[in-house]
Image (cartoon, rainbow, N blue to C red):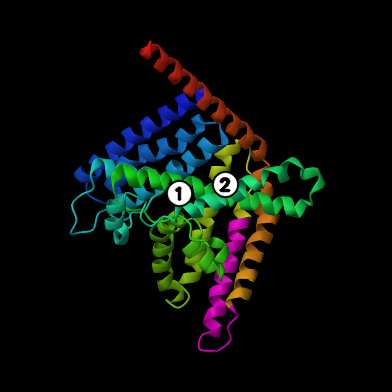
Amino acid sequence: METELQNLIFVWISVIAALTYCRYISVLVPVGLKRLFFFLPVILLFLLLPLRLTSLTLAGLTSFFVAWLSNFKLLLLAYGKGPLVPPPSSAPLSLLLFIAIASLPIKISPATERAASKHGSGGGLMSPANYVMKCLLSVSLFPLYQRSDYVHEKVMMLAYLVHVYIVLEVALAVVGTAAARLIGVAVEPQFNEPYLATSLQDFWGRRWNLMVTSILRPSVYEPIRSASGHLVGRQWARLPAVLTTFAVSALMHELIFYYIGRKEPTWVVMWFFLLHGVAVAAEITVKKALRGTRWQLPAEVSRLLTMGFVVATGFWLFLPSLLRYDTLAKSERETIAIIEFVKSLWSFLSGRSSLCTD
């Protein structure tokens, strides 16, 4: 645990130093290939840094933050786009704000900025009670894991999917709240109750891991849609854009799975996202065909079909790939290690306090 924390400190000091360099390059070098050339060593560094971490949680989150999101933000910045470019009428981002936005999965929420500064909260994030309830639900699943031999396989897989969703949402919310308090602005929520989605478009575009959506849209979807418009016409340009976006997401998920498992990829996760890309494209086509008609499913039926498809494909393709890396056992060991580390740190601090008092 101690070695892993040392590696974590090294990784994030390297990230801060590299982003400081990028901040000044963005001021000194004009947009285009020349700026991209200066960013390339940092992009390569960010692909290598997560390899220094071996724990499931730290390697997974760091690879997501740095190897995926930070690199895509830098690619956008190279061409004067993305969240690191302030609006034309605004002042340049401060160094602290630049590093925070570049390295963390946060999106500044202008509509809630005043509220955040006034109340000292994360602004657009969900209420604390929302996250507490989800944490309690996640904890309630632990006894089920201990009796997995007596529980139906599909019930266990559903519990695992719920656990993955809650851990991911709460972890990103904690990071978002800490960043909001540190830099004094409001941030938007990374999830928007995905289990209420009424379509796959709704699920992936407006509810699930919205930070990824906000990065893939300007970096992949919009350029491909613009280019496709000249080939297949504006009416159908969305389809190749959707398929390409899901393909890029698939490759980045395979990369993150490699960071947390260090095993040769089986590409099953890639097929999960490609399948969903095809399904979203089919959904768009059907909606176009039914436009102007009165035929529409009730919201409750749409939710059931949407979540049924997500859960079924998750059982089939996503979850087996995740469990291949012994994630449950690793998660349990890391939780115990963190608890022991906190106990040791508390004992050390308590001992120092007693000595100072004497």
Categorize mark 2 by other alpha carbons within 10 Å: few (<14), some (14-19), many (20+).
some
Residue 287 on the magenta segment: yes
Residue pointed to by mark 1: 173
Q: Is residue 79 visible?
A: no
- Amino acid type, callout 2: Glu
Q: Main secondary structure of the magenta part?
A: helix
What kind of residue is marked 1?
Ala
Disc 1: CA contacts within 10 A as few (<14), some (14-19) or many (>=20):
many
Residue 349 in the figure: left or right of residue 246? left
| Residue of label 2 | 254
The percent position of residue 39, horizontal first and vertical second, equals 33, 42
Camera-nearest residue between 351 and 106: 351
Which residue occupies the foreground of this view, 138 or 1? 138
Q: Earlier in the sequence, mark 1 or mark 2?
A: 1
| Residue at x 63%, y 56% (from the top left corner) | 271
Q: What residue lies at 58% left-to-right and 83% top-to-bottom?
A: 296
Residue 254 or residue 87, whichever sits in front: 87
Q: Position of residue 227 (x, y in %)?
A: 40, 67
Tell me the element at label 2.
helix
Q: If the image is split into quadrants, where does the N terminus sit?
A: top right
